Amino acid sequence: MLSKLFYPFQLLWRAWFYAAVFISILLVFPFITLFSLNERLYPLFFSFARVWGYSVLLLTGFYPRVINRKYIDPRAKYIIIANHTSMVDIMLTYVAVPNTFKFVGKVELAKIPVFGYYYRRTNILVDRSKLSSKRDVYFSARKALSDNISVCIYPEGGVPEDRSVDLAPFKIGAFRLAIEEGVSVLPIAFPNNKRHHPYDFLMGGMPGMLRAHIMPPISPKGKNEKDLRDECYAVLHAHLLS
């Protein structure tokens, strides 16, 4: 009964979340607009993207807690992976990882007003229905790594429709890229994003602490794609269940 009484307030809070996304973009608008105009300025854009990520979380009552950031070498580049269950995964990834990186994300995100404009201009978008798009993504990711920019891929390939699933099976692309480029995989677990801000608008949610658990990087050396994928899956899944 009590949860039903709070439900209208949860919906209002969820609506405020999306308003906060746009308000926080306005706060850094001059900077992200300028720094999104030229690829060479991307590291500067990234700095303000992190400010944006922090702003959205704080404006909506979230307190981000990053655990074991010590595992990140500030001079290294990584293939960053994380479980994907919530819109706040994007903001929390920005907060958790100080190394400059680009997201590989679905092209549908480019349709979100204002946010989509900057996301399209500064990240790597994939249309999973087109084989040519998948090839383009691969070459764009390799180009980013060659420029010493890390790449973040949510390897489940989307948010699982079944909310009881802790971690859906991983696609192979992130691990193929790690092996071919000789870049370590950096796993990050978001254990409570789904509870605090589920992807489904009608599921409500609540403000509070969001945790990002960073795990030691996993080297691709001496491994094939499947072995690396399975090792990363096992590490991340075990952490989510602990």
Image: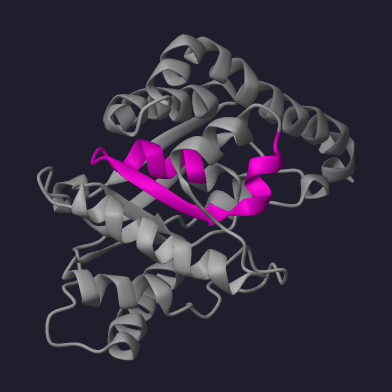
Residue at x-position 19% and y-position 66%? 184
User: Who's the residue at 32% across and 32% down the image?
Assistant: 42
Question: Is 236 in front, or is 225?
Answer: 225
Quadrant of the snapshot with the C terminus = bottom left
Is residue 133 toward the left or the right of residue 5 in the image?
Answer: left
**Picture quarter containing residue 153?**
bottom left
Asked if residue 188 shows in the view, the reply is no
- At which x and y percent is residue 171? 48, 78
Residue 130, picture quadrant: bottom right
Instruction: Tell me where residue 47 appears, x and y as whole percent.
Output: 32, 26
Above or below, 232 relative to 114: below
Q: Indicate whether residue 91 is drawn in magenta.
A: yes
What is the tally of numbered marks visible in this picture? 0
Residue 206 visible in the current orientation = yes
Please state which of residues 80 and 63 is positioned toward the viewer in this rendering.
80
* Residue 76 vertical placement versus 88 (above, below): below
Q: Which residues are magenta?
A: 90-112
Q: Does 207 appear above or below 78? A: above
Please state if 213 lies on the left or on the right of 145 as rendered. Answer: right
Is residue 92 a member of the stretch shown in magenta?
A: yes
For the point 82% across and 35% down, which residue is it?
A: 11
Q: For this rendering, which residue is in front, 107 or 223?
A: 107
Q: Where residue 127 appears, x then y in whole percent?
A: 62, 62
Q: Is residue 165 left or right of residue 201?
A: left
* Applied colour scheme: one colour
Q: Position of residue 66 (x, y in %)?
A: 32, 42
Report the front residue among 29 and 19: 29
Residue drawn at 38 percent across, 46 percent down: 102
In the depicted structure, whether residue 240 falls above or below residue 18: below
